[in-house]
Image (tube, rainbow, N blue to C red):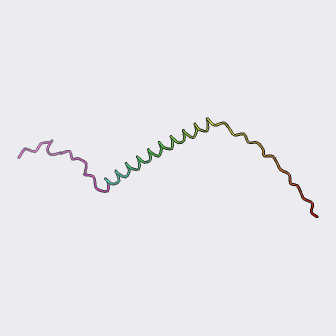
Amino acid sequence: MSKPTKKNLSKVYDAKPETAMEKTTRVVRQMVDEDAEQRHAKNSRLRTARLEREANTPPETTAKPVRKTRRTETGS
């Protein structure tokens, strides 16, 4: 047996092992973060496409519709 020294008396312990619940939480958070990134990328792509389409289309001119007058029939 070796003599007790400062090194072997104060061992550096690794962090406690990850529990099953912590593993599940970590994996689920990773999945949710990936989905959020994909959703953000999709929204950005669609937004830029919409803005580009709106910029390239000429504004619609709204002409007032011609108003029709009613004719009344005179009955016998």
x, y percentage for residue 54?
61, 38
Magenta stretch: dominant secondary structure: loop
Quadrant of the snapshot with the C terminus:
bottom right
Q: Determine whether, in the image, residue 56 is placed left or right of residue 40.
A: right
Q: Determine whether, in the image, residue 2 is placed left or right of residue 17.
A: left
Q: Nearer the viewer, residue 31 or 19?
A: 31
Say if the magenta span includes residue 66.
no
Q: Determine whether, in the image, residue 43 is placed left or right of residue 20.
A: right
User: Residue shown at 29%/56% (left/top)?
Assistant: 20
Q: Nearer the viewer, residue 51 or 29?
A: 51
Say if the magenta span includes residue 17.
yes
25 up-or-down from 50: above or below: below
Q: In the rendered structure, which segment of residues is drawn in magenta?
A: 1-21
x, y percentage for residue 7?
15, 41
- Which quadrant holds residue 64? top right
User: Residue shown at 6%/44% (left/top)?
Assistant: 2
19 up-or-down from 37: above or below: below
x, y percentage for residue 55?
61, 36
Q: Nearer the viewer, residue 60 or 25?
A: 60
User: Residue shown at 34%/51% (left/top)?
Assistant: 27
User: Residue shown at 53%/42% (left/top)?
Assistant: 46
x, y percentage for residue 41?
47, 42
Total marks placed: 0
Q: Nearer the viewer, residue 66 or 73?
A: 73
Residue at the outermost right position: 76
Residue at the outermost bottom position: 76
Residue at the outermost front position: 76
